[in-house]
Amino acid sequence: MPYGRDVLIRVRSESDVPACVAMMRRTHELDGYPRYWRSDPAAFLRGRAETAAYVAVRDGGLVGHVALHSAEGDPALPVVQRATDRPAEQLAVVARLLVSPTARRGGVGQALLDRAVQHAHARDQLPVLNVLPEDVAPRTLYERAGWRPVGEVTLPIEGHDPLLVRVYLGPPPPAG
Ligand SMILES: CC(C)(COP(=O)(O)OP(=O)(O)OC[C@H]1O[C@@H](n2cnc3c(N)ncnc32)[C@H](O)[C@@H]1OP(=O)(O)O)[C@@H](O)C(=O)NCCC(=O)NCCS
């Protein structure tokens, strides 16, 4: 799927993981996402609840990543379910969205978000996500794309202070 400035979004392969981890290291250092650097960053990137993952590629180089996770057991699920009566299997959590600092503001983040939403909609799932309230770049991206905040939840993080995150609902899947 070509996007502006010749960006291709494709399914992440296992051989992409080291480059994704290197990119995540840069976003951790520059943007504070993820807030805490984990002892096994590849396992964090993949996530235990992952159901799918995509990468953005430009000129043969990896410039972005996004994943979808199962909502089953997600700590934000109670907040989501106060705003929608969908059961967990009709939800998809968009996670691990990151774009290389050298490829920003060219539409890559939007393209990855669009792909994740399309993935959820194809399964009749409502996309949801959480974001740190102080992270202006992703919050602006989500709100501009029509996502709406429905509450906040404190996430327990093993070995670290808990994090307060804002929970968003994305566009619902088309009816029928
Ligand atoms: C958030 C992030 C993925 C955006 O990636 P990107 O490729 O630069 O985003 P896009 O170019 O598609 O931007 C789309 C829109 O989002 C908004 N946006 C993106 N970055 C922004 C910023 N730094 N400040 C304000 N708005 C921003 C703008 O509305 C932008 O449209 P515009 O460029 O026409 O003004 C990227 O900044 C990133 O990787 N940040 C660190 C990781 C992170 O925070 N991930 C989210 C975890 S919840």
Image: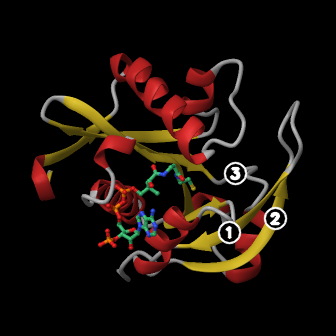
Residue at horizontal 38 percent and vertical 23 percent from the top: 19
Q: Is residue 157 left or right of residue 3?
A: right
Q: Please name the amino acid that badge 3 sits on.
A: Glu
In the rendered view, tell whether residue 144 sits above or below residue 102. Answer: below
Residue 77, how many percent across, how many down? 74, 62
- The dot on residue 167 is 1
In the rendered view, tell whether residue 169 sits above or below residue 67. Answer: below
Q: Is mark 3 within 8 Å of ligand 1?
A: no
For marks 1 and 2 on the same chain, the one whose residue lies earlier in the sequence: 2
Q: Please name the amino acid that badge 1 sits on.
A: Val
SS category of the residue bearing label 1: strand
| For the residues bearing labels 3 and 1, Cβ distance under 8 angstroms | no
Which image quadrant for residue 4?
bottom left
| For the residues bearing labels 1 and 2, Cβ distance under 8 angstroms | yes
| For the residues bearing labels 2 and 3, Cβ distance under 8 angstroms | no
Q: Circle 2 is placed at which residue position?
A: 153
- The dot on residue 72 is 3
Given residues 30 and 166, the one toward you in this image is 30
SS category of the residue bearing label 2: strand
Distance from the alpha carbon under mark 2 to that under mark 3: 16 Å
SS category of the residue bearing label 3: loop
Distance from the alpha carbon under mark 3 to that under mark 1: 15 Å
For marks 3 and 1 on the same chain, the one whose residue lies earlier in the sequence: 3
Which image quadrant for residue 112?
bottom left
Residue 16, how many percent across, how many down? 35, 23
Q: Is residue 140 left or right of residue 82?
A: left
In the rendered view, tell whether residue 121 sits above or below residue 146. Answer: above
Color style of the picture: secondary structure
Residue 149, how many percent across, how many down? 64, 79
